Image (cartoon, grey):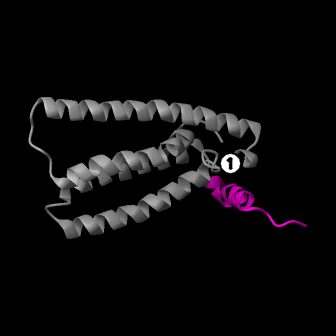
């Protein structure tokens, strides 16, 4: 008997029956809303970076823990379709992943366009430079959104 590979162990962990309660569309959508709430809280937290650095650090640490737990629940609810390699997926899951990535790409492109328009308007209006916390958020938040967007789209859209 051969030892399961890392990919097989990961696929088995994400397909664990203990996650069945997270796989209903209602619960998956609530997890998506919770993750979006965490991203909004993260965006708001960056405004405190210069005024209250200790509160910022504590808040960011708490958000990090909540972010990891929520993302783990989301990955379990989607069975990891958006992250597992091709050999761990069946044809239906492969198709779901392709649809999710295509939709996530369109949403991400729209968000990037909105961010670039905001920067362009900011520069054209000659508004003052925002503080470093806001600039840090403007760099990190799109990165975090990019990390979770395929999972959010998969969890929101279809039964996996």
Left or right of 142 on screen, residue 19: right
Picture quarter with the N terminus: bottom right
Residue occupying image coordinates x 54% and y 46%? 28
Instruction: Identify the residue shown where x is 74% and y is 58%.
Output: 8
> Going by the image, does 119 lie left or right of 82?
left
Count the marks: how many? 1
- On the image, the x and y values in percent for residue 99 come to 60, 32
The image quarter containing residue 72 is: bottom right
11 sits to left or right of 99? right
From the image, which quarter does the C terminus lie in?
A: top right
Q: Main secondary structure of the magenta part?
A: helix
Q: Residues within 10 Å of mark 1 (few under 14, many from 20)?
A: few
- At a point 34% along the width and 48% down the height, the residue shown is 141
Please tell me which residue lies in front, 53 or 132.
132
Q: In the image, is residue 20 part of the stretch drawn in magenta?
A: yes
Where is residue 42? Give x, y as percent: 31, 54
- Residue at image mark 1: 85
Q: Would residue 36 be counted in the magenta stretch?
A: no
Look at the picture and state if 107 lies above or below 73: above
Q: Quadrant of residue 155?
A: top right
Please state the horizontal and vertical placement of residue 95, each as a whole percent of the image: 68, 34
Q: Residue at x 49, y 33 (%)?
A: 105
Residue 138 appears in the figure: yes
Image x and y of residue 29, in percent: 50, 43
Q: Which residues are magenta?
A: 1-22
Can the viewer see residue 40? no
Q: Residue furthest right?
A: 1
Label 1: state its secondary structure. Answer: loop
């Amino acid at each position: 008997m051969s030892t399961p590979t890392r990919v097989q162990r990961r696929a088995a962990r994400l397909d664990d029956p203990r996650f069945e309660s997270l796989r209903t569309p209602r619960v998956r959508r609530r997890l998506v809303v919770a993750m979006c709430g965490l991203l909004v809280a993260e965006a708001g937290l960056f405004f405190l970076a210069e005024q209250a650095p200790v509160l910022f650090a504590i808040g960011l640490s708490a958000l990090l823990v909540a972010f990891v737990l929520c993302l783990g629940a989301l990955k379990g609810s989607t069975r990891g379709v958006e992250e597992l390699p091709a050999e761990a997926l069946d044809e239906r899951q492969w198709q779901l992943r392709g649809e999710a990535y295509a939709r996530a790409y369109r949403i991400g492109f729209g968000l990037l366009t909105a961010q670039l328009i905001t920067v362009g308007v900011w520069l054209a209006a000659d508004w003052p430079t925002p503080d470093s916390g806001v600039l840090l958020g403007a760099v990190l938040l799109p990165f975090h959104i990019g990390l979770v967007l395929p999972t959010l789209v998969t969890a929101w859209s279809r039964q996996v």
